[in-house]
Amino acid sequence: MTVLVLALDTSSAAVTAAVLAVSPATIELVAERVTINARGHGELLAPAIHDALDTAGNVPEDLDAIVVGTGPGPYTGLRVGLVTAAVMSELLGIPAYGVCSLDGLALPGSTMLVAADARRREVYWARYENGRRVAGPEVSYPTDVPPWEGPHVRGAGARLYLDQLRTLRPDVYLLDGDYPSAWSLALRAKGKILAQAPSDPLTPLYLRRPDAVAPGAPKAVSQ
């Protein structure tokens, strides 16, 4: 049995859409579009989905499931991916599965720290042992990240704040790969995909309040 899956992630500066063929033995990346634009998620995701499907020689009705990164990430960008996945799931009548976006940075079977850029001089981080997330996701300053096993780190936040992480452990070794991988997200959801499990709730991992808030009531003017 081979299942055709659309994988999306808008949790970072990378706008990612990919078509993958998932079977019990393999996960094949059929087509992928990744654009680095921290402010363009709303404009770029739909064309990326169209281009990935067109390159794969498929149409949306060919899809069997959707996988989407649930963050952590900025409010606006993250919402674009999750809403798109939910709407497509409803319209196509196929399940959608949410995966922590940091899981899409952790290498299979690895022991490492994953750190994404959270802006405000902070990182979104998670710790992995033998490929399994054992702590996080959390948001903190790089120098406040708790100790982790092994020297390996990965992610845009790790690259940006490598010097600060080296104050925690001098043997830090940065692995290539700044943004979540569609292939890794599909791998994390593989069991649900092949079991044809019901859709996940697609709950976003914001970890902190959005920068933009509704204005409060006007203050009374004293006489």
Image (cartoon, helix red, strand yellow):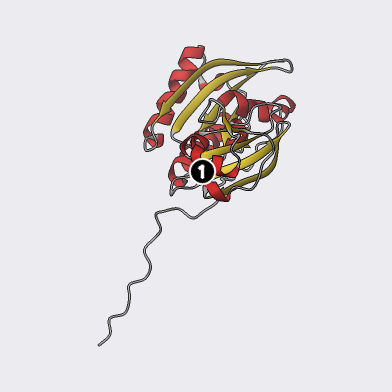
Q: Is any atom of residue 142 visible in this view? A: yes
The residue drawn where x is 45% and y is 47% is 121
The residue drawn where x is 57% and y is 46% is 205
The residue lying toward the viewer, choosing from 49 and 169, is 169
The residue lying toward the viewer, choosing from 9 and 87, is 9
- Disc count in the image? 1
The outermost residue toward the bottom is 223
Relative to 11, is 133 on the left or the right?
Answer: right
Q: In the rendered view of the protein, which quadrant contains the N terminus? A: top right
Percent position of residue 85, x then y:
53, 34
Percent position of residue 113, x then y:
62, 37
Q: Residues within 10 Å of mark 1 (few under 14, many from 20)?
A: some
The outermost residue toward the front is 170
Question: Does residue 71 sit above or below 104 in this rendering?
Answer: below
Which of the 4 image quarters holds residue 223?
Answer: bottom left
Relative to 116, is 188 on the left or the right?
Answer: right
Mark 1: amino acid? Gln
Label 1 residue SS: helix
The residue drawn where x is 58% and y is 16% is 29
Q: Which residue is mark 1?
A: 164
Percent position of residue 53, x then y:
49, 18
